[in-house]
Image (cartoon, helix red, strand yellow):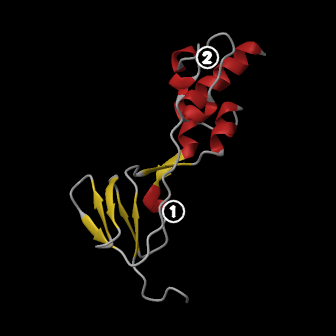
Amino acid sequence: MRLDGAKITLVDARAEHLYQPGLSLVAAGLKPAGYTVSNTTDWLPQGITLVAEHAAAIDPIAKTVATTGGQSIPYDFLVVAPGLVLDHDAIEGFSLDMVDQNGIGALYAGPHYAAKTWEAASKFT
């Protein structure tokens, strides 16, 4: 094993895993909204630790990551994946309140909106 004895820690404030590809199945009426949400820890291999907090700061000299909960996590190697935040407010004339009205959908806004997108599509057809 290439990482024999390695301790891997995942710092991610979202303790729930969102199966984003499944949102299209929800929006198509093939799966219920709950199909896309599970616990992140259910998907982690044995031995990987989840710290369900935001990273607040990285100190590359001390080789630590500080979390919003006050933890200081040491590291030898660090992989940073900042992720993506959808900004629906940046779409002029659009609001998530509009989903399921007049044929409007927004499946990537989350499971609730994917289900409402299916409702909108059902009304349209």
Q: Which residue is mark 2?
A: 100
From what the image shows, is residue 38 above or below residue 29? below
Residue flagged by tag 1: what amino acid is it?
Trp
Which residue is located at x 66 percent, y 46 percent? 21
Element carrying mark 2: loop
From what the image shows, is residue 97 above or below residue 107? above
The percent coordinates of residue 43 (x first, y second) are: 51, 62
Element carrying mark 1: helix
Q: Which mark is residue 97?
A: none
The picture quadrant where one finds residue 28 is top right
From what the image shows, is residue 51 above or below residue 86? below
The picture quadrant where one finds residue 91 is top right
- Quarter containing the N terminus: bottom right
The percent coordinates of residue 87 (x first, y second) are: 52, 31
| Mark 2 Cα-neighbour bin, 10 Å: few <14, some 14–19, many ≥20 | many
**Residue furthest to the front:** 61
Q: Which residue is mark 1?
A: 43
Residue flagged by tag 2: what amino acid is it?
Asp
The percent coordinates of residue 85 (x first, y second) are: 50, 39
Which residue is located at x 50 percent, y 85 percent? 3
